[in-house]
């Protein structure tokens, strides 16, 4: 039985005051459901992680980071390691988000190193995959997503991959207001589960949590969540509004 999981990716938004206010507002909303029937995490910018983790310490809402570096420590100016993230109370880390793939230019190889470092450092990676619009239009969605999974998880054992949450995020639906229809999303989620079954085993494929991300909002959350292979939502824009995010959490129960 897979537990629903709702994650808010705040991207490069909020400030020292509003990050804590937003965290507290989210924590006071779904208190009665978070931790019981749905897992919830928020992913603030690095500089507000510690303050948000402190504001959420008495709640069941977990905190994650938007990125990680794969080395453990040393001369890597500007980078943040798994142990630093653990040290300040992070449980999750995004790896392979489309903005890092396509804006920053991260390769599958780098993403694989980050997923591996996260797991080895005791963090739970949320590993994002998804096709661009031109790839969907060229009927290459399956090939692209399969390749991202194969390369991103290369070298990891089934035990290690059991720490991973998958996220299907069609690039054309992120921050655009365009949402994949529940059927379009379900089709790719089923494909992801099948691919993981082929790479590992049916137990892992059945148990792994697969989130959908791409303009998820209160109005489409329950339809998306009703699909068999959609276990939760990775929410960008709508997670910046506590009422919307809480409504999405409620829709996921
Ligand atoms: C995201 O950042 O992962 C995301 C899905 O963003 P949005 O909900 O704004 O499309």
Image: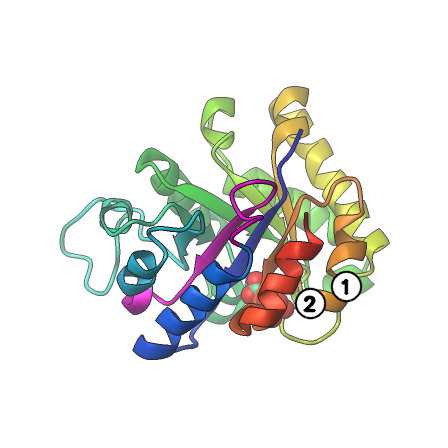
Query: What kind of element bears circle 1?
Result: helix
From the image, tell me which residue sits under label 2.
217
The residue drawn where x is 61% and y is 39% is: 209
The Cα atoms of the two marked residues, 2 and 1, are separated by: 6 Å
Residue 125 falls in image quadrant: top left
Label ID, residue 152: none
Indicate whether 174 appears above or below 91.
below
Nearer to the camera, 188 or 88: 88
The residue drawn where x is 82% and y is 60% is: 181
Q: Residues at badges 2 and 1 in contact (C-beta under 8 Å)? A: yes
Would you call the spot at circle 1 few (<14 residues within 10 Å), some (14-19), or many (20 or more)?
Answer: some
Q: What is the magenta range?
A: 31-48
**Mark 1 Cβ inside 8 Å of ligand 1:** no
Nearer to the camera, 126 or 142: 126
From the image, tell me which residue sits under label 1.
220
**Mark 2 Cβ inside 8 Å of ligand 1:** yes
**How far from the left and from the top, in percent, is residue 33?**
58, 48
Nearer to the camera, 152 or 213: 213
């Amino acid at each position: 039985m897979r537990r629903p999981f709702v994650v808010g990716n705040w991207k490069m938004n909020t400030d020292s005051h509003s990050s804590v206010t937003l965290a507290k507002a989210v924590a006071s909303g779904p208190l009665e459901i978070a931790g019981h029937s749905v897992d919830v995490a928020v992913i603030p910018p690095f500089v507000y992680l510690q303050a948000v983790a402190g504001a959420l310490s008495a709640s069941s809402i977990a905190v994650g980071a938007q990125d990680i570096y794969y080395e453990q420590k040393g001369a890597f100016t500007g980078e943040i390691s798994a142990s630093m993230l653990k040290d300040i109370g992070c449980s999750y880390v995004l790896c392979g988000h489309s903005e890092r793939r396509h804006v920053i230019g991260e390769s599958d190889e780098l993403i694989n190193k980050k997923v591996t470092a996260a797991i080895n450092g005791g963090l739970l990676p949320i590993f994002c995959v998804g096709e661009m619009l031109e790839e969907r239009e060229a009927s290459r969605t399956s090939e692209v997503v399969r390749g991202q999974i194969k390369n991103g998880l290369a070298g990891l054992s089934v035990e290690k991959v059991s720490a991973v949450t998958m996220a299907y995020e069609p690039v054309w639906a992120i921050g655009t207001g365009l949402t994949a229809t529940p059927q379009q999303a379900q089709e790719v989620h089923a494909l992801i589960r099948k691919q993981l079954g082929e790479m590992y085993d049916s137990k892992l494929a059945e148990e792994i949590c697969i989130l959908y991300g791409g303009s998820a909002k209160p109005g489409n959350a329950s339809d998306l969540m009703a699909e068999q292979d959609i276990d939760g939502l990775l929410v960008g824009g709508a997670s910046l509004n506590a009422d919307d995010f809480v409504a999405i959490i409620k829709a996921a129960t």
